Image (cartoon, rainbow, N blue to C red):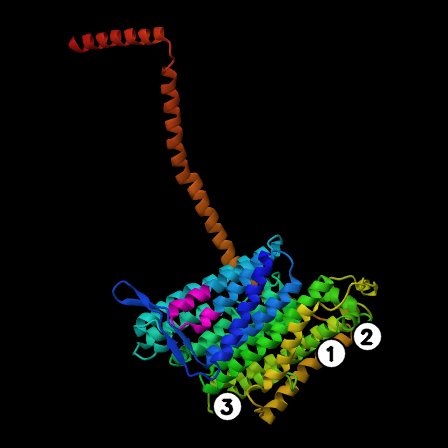
Amino acid sequence: MIATAWRVIGVGFSLLVVLAAGLLYGVDPQQKSFGGTFVGNDVFINYDLRTDDLTVLMLAIVGVVSACVQLYSIGYLHERVASYTALVTLFTASMVTVVVSDSLFLLLIGWELMGACSYLLIGHYWERRDARSGAMKAFLMTRLGDVGFLFGIFVLGLGYDTFTISELGDSPISPGALTTGTILILVGIVGKSAQVPLQTWLPDAMPGPSPVSALIHAATMVAAGVFLIARLYDVFAAAATTFTVLAVIACVTMLFAALCAMAAVEVKRVLAWSTVSQLAIMFAGLSLGTKDGRHAALFHLLTHAAFKGLLFLCAGVLLHQVGSAAFVVLRRYARRGMLRKRMPVTFATMTVGLAALAGVPGFAGFFSKDSVIEAAWDHARDGSTLGWFVLVSVCLTAALTAFYCVRLWLWVFFRTPALAGALGAFEDDDPMADLEEPDSSKLRDGNWLMLAPLILLALGAIGLGYADGVHISWPIALVTTVLALFGALPAYSLWQRGADPRPVLLEREFGLDSAYQRAFVGPVQWLAKLAVGGDRDVIGAYVRGIGRTGVLASAGFRKLQTGNVQTYLTAAVVGVVALAILAGVIGS
C-alpha cells in the first residue's frame, strides 16, 4: 500500500512538472519573492523564484524524463519500492528547485539535495559491494567539487552585494573577484557533471538501477552544470579566463571520455562515458561565449535528454531480461538474432537512440551536434583560437562517437561472421563459449510499463531535432556525415573480422583511478591511520593511565575497609603509638 501510494505521488509530481512547463510556455519572465533573512548585518539570504524560457525548457526536460523513469520503474523494480520511489521524487524536486530558484542559496539547497539523493539511489542495491563503493565514490568526488561551489557563491554574492541570481552583474565587481568566483563555481560544476579531473565517479555509478542512471544522465545532476552556466551566462561571459578554462576542460574531457567508451565492454559503462563526452560538447558550446554557442549547447542538452534517457532504459531492459549488459554475455544471444527477434521493440528503440547519439542524419543528435559545430566554426572564422580548438575537438569526438555506437550496436545485436574469438576478440572469455546455446525461453520485451517510455523517448530522439526548425548548413552537415562514416566503418570492419582490439591504456581508462588511489586515497588513508594511532596510543594512553591509577587507588582504599573491628582497633593503637613516637622524636 505504501509503495503504491509513493508510485502515484511520484508519477503525479512528474506530470505536474510537465504541466507547469506547459502553462509557463510563452509567459513573460517573472520573479516571485518569498522573503528572506539577514545573516549578520550585511548578508541577506532570500528565497526568490523565477520563470523564463530557460526555466520552461528545463522543467519540460526534467518532467518528461522523470515521468518516463517513474512509469518504467513500476515494471522494472520490485525491491524496496517505497524508499526508491520517494528518493526519485525527491531527486526530481531537487532539480526543479535548482531550475526555478532565483537565489544562490536556494539553488545550493537543491544542488546539495541532488548529491544526497544520487548517493542513496546509486547505492540502492546496498547488498552489492560495487554499488556501495560507487555510491561512496560519487558522494565524495561531488562533495569535493561542492566545496569550491560554496565558496564561489560567497565570492560572487559578496562581490556583487546580492545573492539574487537575476541581479548578478547589475553592480560593479573587481575582475579578480569575478574570475575567482566563477572559477570556484566551475569547480562545483566539474564535479557534478563529471568533467576532467573529477570524471571517474560517473562510470562507477553504474551498479545503481538503470532508471536512476537514465534520470541522472538525462535530466538531473549532471545536466545541472550545463543549466547553471546557461543561467549565469552573462556573469561567466564577463570572465574571459573562466571560459578559456572551461573550453580546455571540455575539449580534453570529450576526447578522453570518447576514447574510454571505445574500449568499454559493458553497455551501461559505454553509455556513461558517452554522457561525460556529450556533456563536454555542451560545455564547449557554452565556452564560446556567443549567443549561438549558448543556444546550440541548450539544444544539444534537449536532444541528449531524449536519446540518452532512451538508451539507459533500453540497457535496463537488457539487464532485466538477460541478467547482464556485458558484451561477452549479450553477444551469445546474437548468434541467431535472438535479441532482435524476441525483443523487437527494445532493438528498434535502442537503434534509434544510438543513431541519434552517433549523429546519423535525420535524427535529433545530428541537428544539435551540428549546431555546436556551426557555432564553433562561426567563432573560429572571426579569428578566435578558442573557436578553432573547440571545432577540431568536437569534430574528432563526433568520429569517435560513431565508432563506439556502431561497435556497441553490432556486438550486442548481431553475430560476427568470423569464427568465435577470431583475432583475439574478448580475450578474457572462452572463445568456444559462443558456440553454446543460451536459454532464451523466457527472453522477451519488457511489459508495456517499460516499453511505453521507450517508444515516447524514441519519438523524441527523432522529432526533437526539428523542434527548433530545420537550419542546416550543408557544408557542415556533409563534413559531420563523413566524420561519422570514418568512425563507423572501422567499427564495422573490426566486428566483421571478429576483432575487438582494446589497447591496455584505454581499457584501464588511462589509469587515472589507480593514479588517484596512489596520489590521494593512499596518503589520506595513511594520515587517517596516523591520526587514529596517535589518538589511541598517545592521547588514549594518558587517559587510560589516569583511569588505571584511579582504579588502583580505589582498590587499595577498598582493602582498608575489611569490616573487622579488631583490625580497626589494632590500626588505631598502632597509629597512636606511631604518633607518640613521632612526637617524642620531634620533642628531643
Along the line of sight, the residue nearer the viewer: 152 or 41: 41
Q: Residues within 10 Å of mark 2 (few under 14, many from 20)?
A: few
- Which corner quadrant holds the C terminus? top left
Residue sitting at x 29%, y 9%: 572
Q: Tell me whether the residue at label 1 lies in contact with that at label 3, contact meaning CB atoms closer than 8 angstroms.
A: no
Q: Is residue 52 visible?
A: yes
In this image, 583 relative to 198: left or right? left
Magenta range? 96-112
Q: Earlier in the sequence, mark 3 or mark 2?
A: 3
**What percent of the width, then of the height, locates residue 50?**
41, 76
Rendered position, 576 above or below 440 = above
Tell me the residue that label 2 is attached to. Answer: 417
Along the line of sight, the residue nearer the viewer: 456 or 119: 456
Q: Secondary structure at mark 3?
A: helix
Q: Amino acid at mark 3?
A: Asp
Q: Secondary structure at mark 1?
A: helix
Q: Amino acid at mark 2?
A: Pro
Q: Residues within 10 Å of mark 1 (few under 14, many from 20)?
A: some
Residue sitting at x 72%, y 64%: 321
Q: Tell me whether the residue at label 2 lies in contact with that at label 1, contact meaning CB atoms closer than 8 angstroms.
A: no
For residue 567, which quarter of the picture? top left
Tell me the residue that label 3 is attached to. Answer: 378
For residue 237, which quarter of the picture? bottom left
Rendered position, 373 above or below 506 = below
In this image, 569 relative to 226: left or right? left
Q: CA distance from mark 2 to mark 1?
A: 11 Å
- Residue 54 falls within the magenta-colored stretch: no
- Which corner quadrant holds the N terminus? bottom right
* Magenta-drawn stretch, dominant element (helix, strand or loop): helix
Residue sitting at x 66%, y 68%: 449
Tell me the residue that label 1 is attached to. Answer: 492
Rendered position, 384 above or below 267 = below
